Amino acid sequence: MFKNILIANRGEIAVRIIRTCQEMGIETVAVYSDADEDAAHVIIADQAFPIGASEPAESYLNAERIIKAALTSGAEAIHPGYGFLAENPEFADLCEASGLTFIGPPARVIGDLGNKTLARHIMQKAGVPVIPGMMTDVTDPQLLEREAEALGYPVMLKAVAGGGGKGMRIVRRPEEMEAAAASAVSEAQKAFRDGRIYLEKHLVSPRHIEFQILCDTQGHAVHLFERECSIQRRHQKIIEETPSPALTPPLRTEMSKAAVAAAMTSGYINAGTVEFLLDPSGKFYFLEVNTRLQVEHPITEMTTGVDLVRHQIEIAAGRPLTLTQEEIIPVGHAMECRIYAENPAADFFPSPGPILRHRPPSGPGIRNDCGIREGGHVPVEYDPILSKLCTVAPSREAARRRMIQALESYVILGITTTIPFLIDVLKSAPFSAGHTSTDFIDEHFRDWKPPTTDTDLAGIAYVAHDQFHAAAPANGAAEKRTLTPWDTLGNWRL
């Protein structure tokens, strides 16, 4: 087993990986940019190395500096987390060439599955249904128009090297194609340094269902059931749950078999996620494989009792899977809400700034994977995720109610967060009934505005404090501090 692992990431995922390493008795190495000098992951790691300026290209995307930090620290392996270099085959190759173990799939597999058109060929070979569309990349708008006419509008343009919603455009009419293609190519080039795109049929109101997989180096593969990730903004997930309220036992079995077949055919090793779209008629189609640990992995851990990071590390160390498919029995229902420093009323515009107060919820069935601390700062340079709040309970309704209560007691001051928006989504009748789809927010919450009662409550607290705060005694005796409404109000936001 490894004695020392470098975590090539930041924020809540770096903290989460460090926690499992600590439980396993493995020393950890953090890396940090100028913006993260006093970040939470830096404070809790055994060692920490600066790797450059705040811009990602100068720090967390700088493979050479990360490798140098690993070699200097004596690390034996690198865990990439998610984002940044996690799905970069060149980085995986560089790790191996430097004598370091990359905790993830082989570089070849990352490259094959990261190429969306090649991945579609692999899935066809595995017998996994794929969305009707192109099997090669094309950037000529006229060729794209002809393909779209054959498929029928609407269609979806996608980046060949894409992920995270980058380089994706819905095209509903022929006259939109040229501008959409140019925009998709430009965004893909900036995000992935690869402007190639292709076209698929756009499924109307599908659900986003994914299956967690684990594969070892001895040829064993298991799935850890599904997660539904249909509540999204800009093609990025914000609420996830397991199990999906849409899957029947036969459909779950069929999709899980397809996920394992996809993994085995591609030569997959380590943890990954096979993603599908499920249309309203009950047909499912391959979407992509995420060759890394997913943001939403905690809810799978909460229902199965499996530490996915521990298994990632053990598999990377050459150990066989200690799980059989029959042993993986999910219990209960779990939900995850991603807490972002964003303003939902302004099209989810980022809201960086200081964390003036941080009081996370706690209690039975609550887990909060968090990368911030009171007195810290949310930088403008990175993804604005702050934490992942998760709940588990015996039923979906109980998990939903527990999540609402947890969100309502979550205090983060100094920045705008998505908490009020998430509460309203969870309280909505369509979500309560399990009627979710990838266009849920556009359909039900396009014009959402924050409740005005929050600012009214803060004003009342201010007035109460001003009116009832005791003045200092005239004789100069020491004043006995009294609790103010700011101390006792509980959950309040500005």
Image: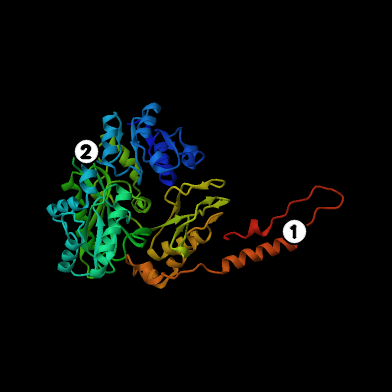
Is residue 63 visible in this depiction of the protein?
yes
Tell me residue 418's x, y (percent): 47, 60
Tell me residue 193's x, y (percent): 29, 47
Please give left or right for residue 108 compared with residue 227 in the image.
left
Please give left or right for residue 156 compared with residue 296 in the image.
left
Tell me residue 5's x, y (percent): 37, 33
Residue 217's mark?
Answer: 2
Tell me residue 440's x, y (percent): 36, 68
Q: Which residue type carries mark 2?
A: Thr
Q: In which quarter of the image is the N terminus?
A: top left
From the viewer's perspective, is residue 98 above or below residue 454?
A: above
Residue at mark 1 to residue at mark 2: CA–CA distance: 66 Å
Give residue 3's quadrant in the image: top left
In the displayed orientation, state which residue is furthest to the right.
Answer: 475
Q: In which quarter of the image is the C terminus?
A: bottom right
Q: Identify the residue position indicated by label 1 in the image.
A: 469
- Between 88 and 187, the residue placed more toward the observer is 187
**For numbered disc 1, what is the local secondary structure?**
loop
Point 24% across, 38% down: residue: 320
**For numbered disc 2, what is the local secondary structure?**
loop
Q: Which residue type carries mark 1?
A: His
Is residue 248 visible in this depiction of the protein?
no
Point 36% across, 41% down: residue: 61
- Between 379 and 400, the residue placed more toward the observer is 379
- Between 327 and 83, the residue placed more toward the observer is 83
Does label 1 or label 2 sit earlier along the sequence?
2
Closest to the camera, between mark 1 and mark 2, is 1
